[in-house]
Image (cartoon, grey):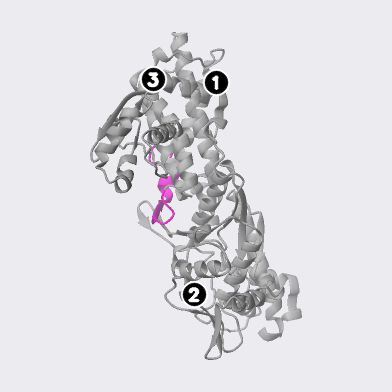
Amino acid sequence: MHSLLRKKLEEAILKLNYQVELQIEVEIPKNEVFGDFSSPVAMELTKTLKKPPRTIADEILSVIDREFFEEISIAGPGFINFKFKREFLFDQLKELLEKEEKFFITDIGKSRKVQIEFVSANPTGPLHLGHGRGAAIGSALSNILKEAGYEVTTEYYINDAGKQVEILGLSVYLALQRIWGKEVEFPEECYKGEYIKEIAQELYESYGDSIKDKSYEEVGDLIIDFSYRKIINEIKKDLEDFGVTFDSWVSERKLYHTGEVQRAIIKLKELGFVYEKDGALWFRSTSFGDDKDRVVLKSDGTYTYFASDIAYHKNKIERGFDELINIWGADHHGYIPRVKAAVQALGFKASQIKILLVQMVNLLREGKPFQMSKRAGTFVTLRELIDEIGADTTRFIFLTRRQDSHLEFDVEVAKKQSQENPVFYVQYAHARINSIFEKAGHISYGFNGELFNEEEMRLIKKVLQYPMIFELAVNFREPHRITFYLQELASLFHSYYHKHRVLSDDEKLSQTRLSLCRAIMIVLRHGLRMLGVKAPHKM
């Protein structure tokens, strides 16, 4: 419906010969009394046309094709509100029932190549809840963009070089000494979770006393390699059980071994964006809006983390992506200007890279915060949460807020089979409709628009809003829009179900109501699939 409305507004503007290029916005009014859809187009045109928005709105209304509209009105400073005819809504509903999920899909992406890099946690310990939230967002966004016609590649960047893996190796080495009964102290910077002891035990079982009296300098590389590979394998397993897989895994260490880091800095130097100062090499990130230039090669001859970030993004660009999406933890906010600067220096437009920051998750149990984990030592792991409440529930709740909003996650609420638990409420709506169809037996869904009451019309309109919600989720790269919508649709359906019998002695009425249930079921199934959550038939 939104695409038809947009088309009618475009035609009206063309008739008025306004001579403007404009992406027409269409919105769903917060209050249904204002209509089914509204548009601020008149207010958007006022600056260009030098006219009051209500005057522009009047002009648009004087020429717009009213074939599909029962009512068009102007409200407030110049919003144009639209109410569709019942007959048009019924035609749309019939089309949805015929096409099913194909009804929602338009080729927005046109095969443009998008790379989404997400999670990319350091291989120094288990995934925490922030990583899990990033995984849910990245995976859902990948599903949505693929469905919209983009060619999507998902990627995990393994930070397996630098100080953090050195600290991991030292932590395991010290834990190994304790297995041999040696009294050793763990420096403050070392990792101390139960998982460090587990890795040390496995290392002992694999190598025995052959490394017992070796210094860290002698066995450090072996321990680092053993430890980080063990953790990466656990990360992969946790993500797979969470329903998240990647098309490729890229190693930071490999970027150094293949000379890509060195070549990236040389390239920027040739382009005039790297200079020498105080014995170090600096990248001119201020040329692209950063607040200061950044060191890429320190005076001691070692590269900074930023140098490998530049090489990695150069690698991405050379693979021919039209857009890069990076999903990072909120603590990486300061890295955005320098990475965008590097990408632009390498020939990409700033608009071709989008960085989504994911806020942390505050875990609650019966309303009270808790964050300690036996295995990780300092935080609850994603694995622990999946084991306690399941992957579907965890994913859905991670997607109930914008990624840059803080999220409070109450484990006990997530276990409840009630309206308080958002994923249960949505999945139960799908299961409940499936149960209705099982009970219907020989009665198939049919269509008689005259039999729809006002509550059913409200549900029909809600169902027909879904293509617009899906399009907005695609265009703004925001999967949570679908989560919000599914909760609203499920709430409307459950309320309707408690007031009205779908199956009755009146076969025509039953068939008509089954047609509405079928449409709701199609939307719920598609929305849940986009989020990576199951649509169960029984609960």
Q: Residues within 10 Å of mark 3 (few under 14, many from 20)?
A: some
Residue sitting at 30 percent across and 48 percent down? 47
Q: Secondary structure at mark 1?
A: helix
Q: Tag on residue 101? A: none
Q: Earlier in the sequence, mark 2 or mark 1?
A: 2
The numbered mark, 3 or 1, whose residue comes first in the sequence reads: 3
Name the front one of labels 3 and 1.
3
Magenta stretch? Answer: 401-420
Q: Nearer the viewer, mark 2 or mark 3?
A: 2
The kind of residue tagged 2 is: Ser
Sequence order check: which comes first, mark 2 or mark 3? 3
Q: Quadrant of residue 533?
A: top right
Query: Does residue 220 appear in the picture of this structure?
Result: yes
Locate residue 281: give its quadrant. Answer: bottom right
Residue 209 at x, y = what percent? 74, 79
Q: Which residue is mark 3?
A: 86
State left or right for residue 234 relative to residue 306.
Answer: right
Q: Secondary structure at mark 3?
A: helix
- Could you give the CA–CA distance between mark 2 and mark 3, rounded to whole angstroms? 57 Å
Q: Which residue is mark 1?
A: 438
